[in-house]
Amino acid sequence: MVYHFDTPYRWAQMRRTRRVDTLRQVKEKGMIRGTMCARMRAVIVTMAAAILGCVVGPAAGATTADQFKPVTQDRLLRAAENPSDWLIYGGNYAGTWFTPLKQIDTSNVSKLAPAWAFSMGVLGGQDGIPVVNNGVMYITSAWSKLFALDAKTGTLLWMYEADLPENISAMLCCDVVNRGVAVLGDRVFWATLDGHLLALDARSGKVIWNVTVANWQAGYTLTAAPLIVKNKVLIGPGGGEFGIRGFLVAYDADTGKEAWKTYTVPAPGEPGSETWPGNTEAWRHGGGATWLTGAYDPELNLVYWGTSNPSPVFYGPQRQGDNLYTSSMLALDADTGKIKWHFQFTPHDVWDYDGVNQPMLLDNVRLADGRVVAKALAQANRNGHFYLLDRTNGQVVYAHPFIHVDSIEVDPATGKMTPLKFATPDAPVVACGHGTAGKEWVSMAYSPLTHFVYVPAIEMCGKFFALDLDYQKGKPYYGGGHERVPPASGHVTAIDLATGKAAWRYDTAWPMYAGVLATGGGVLFVGNPQGELEALDQKTGKKLWGFRTGSGIVTNPMSFAVDGRQYVAISSGWSIVPSKAIAGAKLVDKPGQKNVLGSTMLFVFALPEAERVSEQRQPAQATAGQAQSGQVRSGSSR
């Protein structure tokens, strides 16, 4: 369903139409998928019916799909130079979540208003981030649905819905989510919850190839957006809570044939196997999932990818040792998948801290002591520490806490972790932070205007407990748990890369389960559990604007431009993990949160036509005068 807005301040009167033509059955490599072909007129509101395994055809008279511009590898490499498109999950291969677009800036963002909105017609956590190519948007939703839209109007061009197994939700730790697609040539690449990776025709949604990446019945699921590297499609599974053996795999984009596969838990005799107990099968069920999209440095030809918790999650005696390469950052050869270096954030993780969070690639980072890190990698970890690494070799530059942590201690110079509080079967323990504290999977953002990295943070403690548990295929393999202990809160923290410490902090009453986007106009966009998309000043953290979407936001904002007009997009749809956290922290009944309902909407914002400036053809560039350091201060509380 698409909602158009005749004026930026007034809802237009809506009309609805729906016409369904035919339904046919399509057989794809043993999978039966129903396909619904529909013609839809470009009206103010368009309803897309949720039919299992469906492809919905373009609206009558729609030409946007026909104008799809093939995505070359060169365009992907130069994604940051053409900010009108958003071709890669993180905006560029470096994963900076920065757009040089500056039509929307600190002086006019208060006038931002909805341009259009699209209903995806299904409940569930909405993690999807749009990809935009030459005016065509691809957005995914919960329950493995994919939509192609006219990015200027929101008109539905086609949709595809996976025919999922009825009991797939029993194999999911963290909701029926999907985080997006990748594009190359005239194809869209997309992964489904039941372990399939598909290549679809970008103009029609027709399936070109479909491969099984992993067995969902063993606990493997796919929720990440794939990453295109050269002519390969990279994807990694979730399932660390079910005792999978994690891996990262690359497929040939033309044929779907496997190019390489690298396991994140070594087999006996392989490098790293000495960090697992000998004479056991622990490595076969050791976890180390790779369920979030990584980054790529074409000069070094290295792919950077985080790995998740070991298994069982909370019970360590079954897996004595550091448990490589779980809760780590890996640098892999893009051509072969060979691990070139690793850094383990949390050895022998028994808190569910993971290491899967976004790797951000930064060049020529100048430190406070005058040193320059030519090629750096930054990560804000769930263990509550912000790390800066040399991405040529994995050496730690610094590591500093950005939330209150008393469960572990991390050496700021070496990154070495020392455990302080952990549970045993006989002794639960209360420790900070909780396993879903620090920074969740959502994006942090870098701005060249300030040289700050903006981190959405969660302050939360937990009661940890451990239980001896034997592995059973397809069954949860937690070996304990962690209850939320109130109170809980959040903040957006601007970290000065020169020091790794806070320049300013925008405090919130709620844990921050949504990501951030930095723009060339000096604006920082961020969502929150109450469903509000906010705009902050990058230099100070001052709130400049807000819009309530009607459901909690648990994903990342992005920006693009069509015909010289800049847009900002965010999906709204409450999810299981943050809702459990809100409940456990006793925040459900507080004003602003108790009425947050489930939904799956995509909102797209723009300035009124009269406020537009001339079409931006060149990315904004930071000047020496714009690169300022802030001072530590608290933002406005809510």
Image: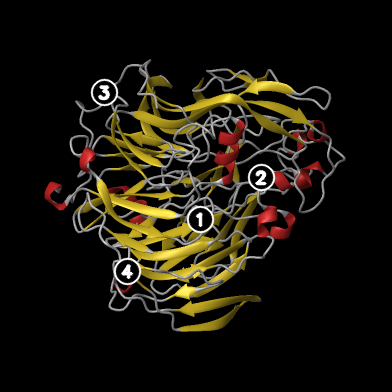
Query: What residue appears at the point 31 percent right and 74 percent down from the top-left corner?
Result: 66
Callout in the foreground (3, 2): 3
- Circle nearer the N terminus (3, 2): 2
Q: Earlier in the sequence, mark 2 or mark 1?
A: 1
Report which residue position mark 4 lands on: 68
**Real-space Cα distance between discs 1 and 4?**
20 Å
Q: CA distance from mark 2 to mark 1?
A: 18 Å
Query: In whole angstroms, how far apart are the C-alphas of marks 2 and 4?
Result: 37 Å
Sequence-wise, which precedes: disc 1 or disc 4?
A: 4
- Report which residue position mark 3 lands on: 628
Residue type of the residue flagged with mark 2: Thr
Label 2 vs label 4, nearer the camera: 4
Residue contact at pointers 2 and 1, CB within 8 angstroms? no
341 vs 381, nearest the viewer: 381
Which part of the image, by quadrant, shows the N terminus? bottom left
Q: Nearer the viewer, residue 247 or 409?
A: 409
Label 3 close to label 1 by CB (< 8 Å): no
What is the x, y in percent for residue 383? 58, 28
- Determine whether label 1 and label 4 are within 8 Å by CB: no
Q: Position of residue 236 (x, y in %)?
A: 59, 52
Badge 1 marks a residue whose secondary structure is loop
- State the separation of the CA atoms marked 3 and 1: 35 Å
- Element at label 4: loop
Q: Amino acid at mark 4?
A: Phe
C-alpha gap between disc 3 and disc 4 = 40 Å
